[in-house]
Amino acid sequence: MKPHSRILDDYFIEKFESSIVDPQTDISKHPYAIIALGGYGRKEQCIHSDVDLLFLFEKNVPDEADDIIQETVYPIWDIGLDVGHSTRSIKECVSLSEQDFVILTSVLDARFICGMSVLYSELMKQIREKVIRDKSDKIIKWLVQSGIKRHGRFGDSAYLLEPNIKEGQGGLRDYHTMLWIARIKYNIKQPRDLEYYGLLSHSEFRILKETLSFIWNVRNRLHYIAGRKCDQLYFEYQTELADTLNLREQNGLQPVERFLAKLHSRMELLKQQYLMFIGEQAYTEKSKSAKKLNTQSQINGLEVKRGMLNFVSSEAILDSPDLLITIFEESARLQVPLSSEAKRQLKEFIYLIDDDFRNSSFALKSFERILFAPPTTIDVLNYMLTTGFLVQFIPEFKSIVNRIQFDEYHLYPVARHSLLTVQTIKKFGTSADKTEDQLCGNLYKELSNKRLLLWAAFFHDIGKGEPAGGHSQRGAKIVNDILKKRGFKKSDIETIIFLINEHLLLIKTASRRDINDEETAISCARKIKDIERLIMLYLLTVSDSISTGPKAWNEWTSALLRNFFLTVLNILKKGELATGEAVETVNKKKKEILLSASSLQEKQKLEQFFEVMSPRYLLYTLAQDILEHIRLYKKLGNTDFVWKVTRTSDSNTRVVTICAIDRPGLFSKIAGVFTLNSIDILDTQAYTWRNNIALDIFKVKPPIDQIFETERWDKAEANLKSALADELNLTEALKEKMSAYQSFRPRASKRPTRIVVDNGSSSFFTIIEVFAYDFPGLLFSITDALLRCGLDVWISKISTKVDQVVDVFYVRDFDGQKVDAPDRVHAIKKALSDVLPGTGV
């Protein structure tokens, strides 16, 4: 940073002193100064960053200025530096600064390099007298509003997967804004003046300095790795950047996870320092917060000043340590934010929160009222986290603060995600509800014991403090100890522990098992047992998914989870489905189908179709779909297959129904053709009629270029015809596409590929789970390997974990039997391992 700036300073000074142009232009008649602006002016020059210069003249800019610039700037342009320069008189600089505050901020960072120093001094004097003196409030208001817009555009860098370390909230631009405001209000000359003028305490300035040093170091390295100016910390740079910092794996955390945890914590510190600074220095009587001047606290030891909540004094805290939690409860009740000074005092007196405080009934009840408080713009739980109160009050929480999960799936550090999960639950049924229907809102409204659900949401991921697997079970043990110490009732502990232990049950089952199989829903119902627990588990699952990020929650996931929840709920309400009820359902469906017949002959033909349809198909397929499948079958004739592509109501997916003569490898070839045509498979169902007809139903994403979608489907249909006729070798056709991606090193976490063969969850199928990094041809590779093992795929579930996919297959051998012999299970794992890189069986 400073060394880079010094190198440039030395260059410009040497150029000025040895100038050939200056004597020719008579510098005494046209005095000028070379002034550094922007990051160069602040001595923050990074590799590949712009070099901003001002050639400042006293009155008029002479014609010879172009020669000066050519002599000074062109050589560093030639070596690849990006130089931004301007030539202006003092009067022009003042006028432009008055009209455009972006230019003003650049001038506020101005630093004299060489030339006539008196010009620089005169410029800064006139800027203060003619621009800042009469417009300081207006400029500061503009800076604050610009910051809000900037944060809206670039997001909160402390919680983003790919943060912008300069422009995002918690980025370097927040620090620059603090400097500009301090220069406008107090005319500070250097960053250290923030402490000298009392704008920051000694410890705050020390922490700020350490924070900036780390972020600057990261920015420099990022620019170097990218080979250009780049302030967005993209995934592909994160691992390499962590390696350059010489970080090693520690306590199971990858170097990149340690790096991101450190970066996020530093950016969170900078964000909080910025917010405190803005709250104190950018406050005006006309600001929105001033509207709450008449709000007053009724709690002794607390007061509202200038629309913010404060401790009356430090002595009040020492006399009544309970104020340390009461101030948060009062903030939630009054909807008044904590002042910067209150946050400082909380950190200063945090040591008063000892075991007696933690286990007191007063503190517990106060915290529960905060946990239960309606969702508002004042995020009190986040205040508790950022001030350090939460970790001091619940020490076990420390292990998940700034705990990063290095993938494209989890947007937030674990602690922040946990608090968002609580907030999401409390928003159910409100205008801020992010679910598509009113189901969650209605369920939450009718829930008799919301308290237990919110405690479970708060603690649900606390087991992630340790990187080893099984965080749900580990978290349940941790929380069991926490709640016992705090005197919770045994029944309440059991419910909270159950919710934490099973918080992934519904989403894993819905996305990885055949939810049309009665056995799947019954198994879940038996585990959950109680309707209220099921409702709490569903609400926790939805809020957990929403709070994880958009790749964890979408229309497809929502519908899948909702339908499965309603199925399990029905079982708990009415009892396990009896065979008689299933028979009745099938009979009703048959009658509905027969009503569509226009003649006795047609009715008889439909009854013949019933004879070849499997009970499972008749039970779980809608009547109108059965009729459509019959129509499709009639078109089959002597061809190998026919298909129908249907656009779903939301237009985001397609349903491809394929009616074909059954044969080994049919599913695999369909998957290969879809891959060849870049069509992503979301879900599948496979049915076989007794007349050797296969019905494979694929839910897929539409082709990328939907303008030519018809042409793409025509091509895919032709490819499938060729593949079934053995005219197209899919293995060879996919080889180039697959090898390009299989050689690609996953940019997120390095979890190994894993294969699980489950013969216990289903009475009729062997279930094979494959956890693997996604690449084109993955599904084809797996199903082709299963074919070579003599297995038929009956049902397939594709569950994406973003950096990994979980492909689940319900299979039987060619004789229709489960595969449970140990040697055959081993052979299946071996065959799959051979086609998947990095497999751990």
Image (spheres, helix red, strand yellow):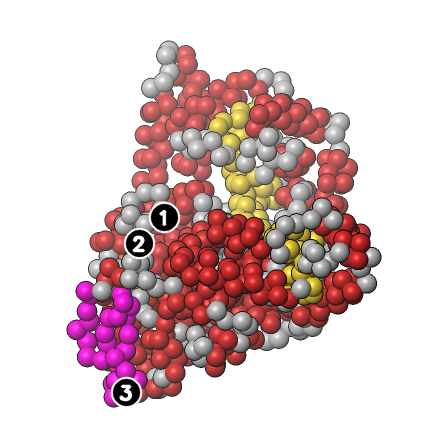
In the shown orientation, is residue 228 left or right of residue 187? right
Q: Secondary structure beneath disc 1?
A: loop
Q: Is residue 812 visible?
A: yes
- Nearer to the camera, 403 or 651: 403
The amino acid type of the residue labelled 2 equals Lys
Q: Is residue 101 above or below residue 179?
A: above
Task: Give yes or no for contact between labels 2 and 1 (Cβ–Cβ under 8 Å).
Answer: yes
Left or right of 311, for residue 461: right
Instruction: Say what amino acid the circle numbered 3 marks.
Output: Glu
Q: Which residue is mark 1?
A: 434
Which residue carries the number 2 mark?
427
- Total numbered labels: 3
Instruction: Kindly identify the residue that appears in the image at 48 percent across and 81 percent down.
Output: 202
Mark 2 burial class by Cα count in 10 Å: few <14, some 14-19, many 20+ = many
Q: Is residue 301 magenta?
A: yes
Q: Secondary structure at mark 3?
A: helix
- Please tell me the numbered disc located at residue 826: none
Residue drawn 64% across the image and 66% down it: 117
In the foreground, 771 or 479: 479
Which amino acid is tagged 1?
Answer: Lys
Query: In the orientation shown, which residue stands out farthest toward the left?
Result: 298
Q: Quadrant of the N terminus?
A: bottom right
Q: Position of residue 323 (x, y in %)?
A: 26, 79
